Image (cartoon, rainbow, N blue to C red):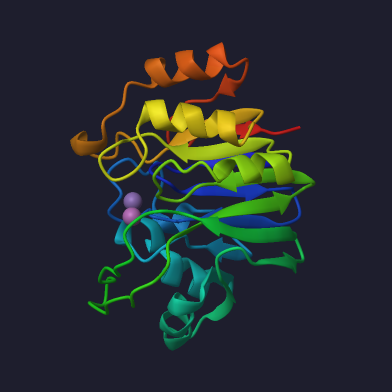
Amino acid sequence: MLLTFYGHSAVLLSDGKHTVIVDPYISGNPVAPVKSSEVPKVDYILVTHGHADHFGDSVALGKRDGATIICTWELKKYFEGKGLKVHALSTGGGHDFPFGRVKATIAFHGCGGDADADGDILPPNSPVGYVITIGKRNIYHAGDTALFSDMKLIGERYQIHCACLPIGDNFTMGPDDAALACDFVKAERVVPIHYDTWDIIHSDTRIFQYKIEKQGRKAYCLKPGEGIDIP
Ligand code: NI
Ligand code: MN
C-alpha cells in the first residue's frame, strides 16, 4: 500500500488496484508538488470537512475521473449539485467500498462551509476524520481536529498501520498534542500533515519526530510529493 503526500492534508492511497485521495487541496495550495491535472486517476475522493483547504479540487477531480465523493451527509447535496456521485457517511458510521472500508470518526473543529471556485458556499457540516482500510492496511486520517481522549478507542478497535495527524497548531493540534494522539491511536507510523503550508501553521518537525521516536514509533515527515510504502 503506497501513501503519497501532496502537501497540507492531501494524501493519496493506492493498493495498486484502487486509488483514493483524502482532502485534495492542490489548486491554490502553495506547497502542492503538482498541478491538479497531474494528480493520478482516483476512484474515490474523501472530504473531511467544508473548508477550502480540504475540499480543494474535489469537484474538478471527481468530474475528471468519474470518482465518487465520500463525505458527510450535510455535504452530499452540494457535491450532487455539482453533478458528482456521492456516498455520505455520518460520524461513527462505516461502509464497505470496492477498495475496502471507510469509517467516519469524530473530529473537533469548525463546521462552517467555505466558498468554492464558483463562489458557491458549502453548507454547515460536521467535520470528521476517517479510518480507511485499503490493501489490508488501516490508515487514520484525522482531518482537522483538536486532541480528544476518545482517540484511544480508535487504537483499541483498529491496528493503525499509519496515522496522518495535523501538527501545525493554531487551527488544529500542534506537535505536542499530535504526539499524544499518536500514542492514543497506537499508530505504528505517523505522517504529519497540515503544517508549513503557511507561516501561521509553521511547525518544527524535529520536535515532533523526537517525541514520536521516544514512543518507539516512526514519524515520516514527508516533503510534498514524497511517499512511503506501508507493507
Ligand atoms: Ni478546517
Ligand atoms: Mn484546515
Where in the figure is residue 91, as x and y percent of width and height? 55, 65
Where in the figure is residue 123, as x and y percent of width and height? 33, 78
Q: Residue at x 44, y 76 (%)?
A: 75
Q: From this viewpoint, which residue is outermost toward the left?
A: 199
Q: Quadrant of the N terminus?
A: top right
Residue nearer the viewer, 87 or 124: 124
Report whether 135 appears left or right of 83: right
Residue nearer the viewer, 117 or 195: 195
Evaluate whether residue 190 shows in this view: no
Q: Residue at x 73, y 51 (%)?
A: 134
Where in the figure is residue 190, as x and y percent of width and height? 56, 31
Q: Quadrant of the C terminus?
A: top right
Residue nearer the viewer, 2 or 128: 128
Residue nearer the viewer, 114 or 66: 114
Q: Residue at x 62, y 48 (%)?
A: 13
Judge whether 97 appears above or below 145 on screen.
below
Q: From this viewpoint, which residue is outermost toward the front?
A: 149
Report whether 93 appears left or right of 25: right
Judge whether 129 appears above or below 152 on screen.
below
